[in-house]
Structures are given as structure tokens and as C-alpha cells.
Amino acid sequence: MKILKLPKEKLDFFASVVQQFGEVHAPVEQDGKYVFQRLSRWSEARLDYDRTILPPKKYTLPPRETLFQYRAGQGYLPSTEGLDKRIVLMGVHACDVYGLNLLDQVFSGRYDDPPYQTRRKNMAIIGIDCRPDGSCFCRSMRADFVDRGFDLFFYDIGDYYLTLVGTALGDDMVLATGPLFEKASPEDIDEYKRRSSSKRQAFQLEVEIRDLPEIFEMEYQSGIWDELGEKCLSCGSCSMVCPTCYCHDVADDAQLGSRDGGRNRSWDSCLFAAHAAVAGGENFRNSRASRIKLRYYHKHRGFVAEYGRPGCVGCGRCIAACPVEIHIGDVIAKLRGIQNAPSR
Ligand code: SF4
Ligand code: SF4
């Protein structure tokens, strides 16, 4: 991997050059929170953000999309709208790159998904390092550093960004900017290591994941799930904001008496009361306790069995979004027999 550095005062020029690779999107402040959106000018970008409301999955798996349409006499018409749009997403944190890498595995494996894959292929990722707040535990989830899934990744080392070049596209971006990037010196590497070590000390929240799938196995009948079911509102906010949740509903949009229609996909949540309802009136997860339990088991046991790592990257969004303050760190601590999530 190539390691370079970019002077911070040249970042806006860099952003103007990478427009040739696609629409530039970055975190922007809205009412005190942050959202990824298209920039109309570089000064809107807030690279010092904590976390965006929605993760980058909104680009690869949009909240609602038409998969295909059908017309009498024309048959099946695949929907390609927006699929060829090229996006350069700037300022993505390591946990969110990790989230995308996990979704890539989901949508490129057993569930081969061409619309997802096309959007992902057309999206360049420029990562940026961050400082953890009280809800971040990406270090515990081994997602505070990524070595793949980005084109460029910037680390703040004072007057410069130490830059990891992750792909040939990232290399093209560097070349397109002319002599903007410089060779990193041994002193720059030392500064990177010093800051990386200081970041490790800055985490306030720790979640122990060693033997967690086994603990989940042992606690399947725990009363904790009923307690959570009493508290949870089934609002689904935790799933919507999660970078690795991908439950979706697929439904036809057909008019009575017409032979035309379309098939749409929209985000769903395993927390919603109707998620496991089937024809005939049966609902396999009627109680809120069974639904919240499923979400935790899928993240911390199912994902490990299927993909070799948990389906949580420790971004803290579900902690920030839950209206009744259900805290993933506290849930795991209680399953371990500890009262609250340990802070460092
Ligand atoms: S479960 Fe919560 S902390 Fe983990 S990745 Fe999802 S939103 Fe982030
Ligand atoms: S955000 Fe909280 S209340 Fe809403 S479904 Fe998730 S755990 Fe339940």
C-alpha cells in the first residue's frame, strides 16, 4: 500500500479535482446533527463530525427503490435509474467502511444483488480518521482501523493528512491532483503512530467480545430479553441507523384492473411487529422480546457463524437513536453478569 501525505490547506483543491471522478458527497451539519449529502461547495463539508444520522448504506441500499417494472406487451423492464451515477463519498470513518465491507459480503455472496453491487462499484470511498466519543466502541469491535474497502484514507498528523492509497482508483485520484501529494517521511510515520496510540486511550466505552457468541448461546432463555421487550418500543430506529442492518421488504405496486406495475424494495426492521408475519395470520415473532432478541443474536452470533466476525462495528448510532435508552454495551454487560457497560 502506498503511503503519502497531503497538506491540509490543499484539501479543498483536492476536493475540486476529484469532482471529475463523480459527485462529491461528504458529512454536512443539519440542526446540530450530521448527514452525508452532495456538496454544493466545499465549505459545507464537516470532516470533524462525530457520526452521521444514516450510514453510507443509504447510497448502496437506498431506503426505497424500484427493482423492476412490468408493462402489458413489454414484459419485464429492469430499473436502472441512478445506477450509473458515480459518487465520491468523502470523510467516511473506519467503522462505516467496515460496515460497507460487511454489506458487500452479504450482497455478493449467497444473496447476489446486482443493484447493490453496481452502486457500490460506482462509489469511491475517501476515509478519514476520527476521535471517539462516549458512544463509540469500534475499537472493541476491531473496526477502528480498516485495511481495505476504501480508495484513499486520511489520518490527521498536524499540518498534513497521512494518506493510505487503497486502490488503483485512489492512485488515479492522487495522479489527477498533480504534485499535491508528497512522500511521507519517517517523522510523519512517527506522528501517525503517536496519534494512533493517543486515540486508543481516548475510548470511553469498552465492550468485551471474546467468547460473546458462546455467552449468547448460554443466555438464550435469559430474563434479560423479557426486560428489554418490556422497554423496547419496536420503533426500528436502531435498525434504520445501523450500518450493517439490511432487512428489507419487497412488494409489488400494482393497480387493480391494470396489467402494469412495479416491484419495490424498502428498508424494513426485524423490530417491527409485522416483520415475521406470514399469510394465514401467523407471526413467528409476535412478542417484542423475541424481536429484540433476534436482532442481538443475528449481530453477535449469526454474523460470526456466517462471516467470521460480529455484525456490529461499534459506531454507537443505535445508542444515540434509541428513544428509551437501550444501550448495546449495557445489554452485553448484563448478559455477562456485569451491571453496566464498562468505561475505560
Ligand atoms: S448495532 Fe449499533 S453500534 Fe453496532 S453497528 Fe449497528 S448501530 Fe452501530
Ligand atoms: S431504537 Fe430502541 S426502542 Fe426503538 S426498536 Fe430499537 S431498541 Fe427498541
Image (tube, rainbow, N blue to C red):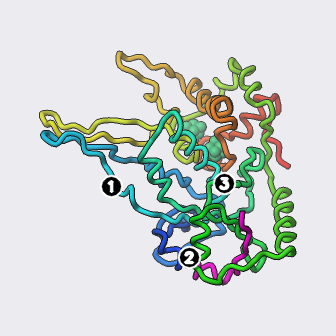
Position of residue 90 in the picture relative to residue 274 (left or right)? right
Residue kind at label 1, given as amino acid type:
Glu
Q: In which image quadrant can residue 189 be found?
A: bottom right
- Secondary structure category for the residue under label 3: loop
Report the Cα–Cα distance between label 3 and label 2: 21 Å
| Mark carried by residue 148 | 3
Residue 230 seen: no
**Residue 344, relative to residue 43: is it above or below?**
above
Residue designated by label 1: 81
Residue 9 coordinates in the image, percent (x, y): 66, 83
Residue 192 coordinates in the image, percent (x, y): 82, 68
Q: Earlier in the sequence, mark 2 or mark 1?
A: 2
**Residue 298, relative to residue 311: is it above or below?**
above
- Secondary structure category for the residue under label 1: loop
Residue designated by label 2: 15
Residue kind at label 3, given as amino acid type:
Arg
| Mark carried by residue 344 | none
Closer to the camera, 181 or 140?
A: 181
Which quadrant would the N terminus be assigned to in this image? bottom right
Report the Cα–Cα distance between label 1 and label 3: 28 Å
Closer to the camera, 191 or 167?
A: 167
The number of callouts visible is: 3
Q: Earlier in the sequence, mark 3 or mark 2?
A: 2
Closer to the camera, 343 or 200?
A: 200
Residue kind at label 2, given as amino acid type:
Ala
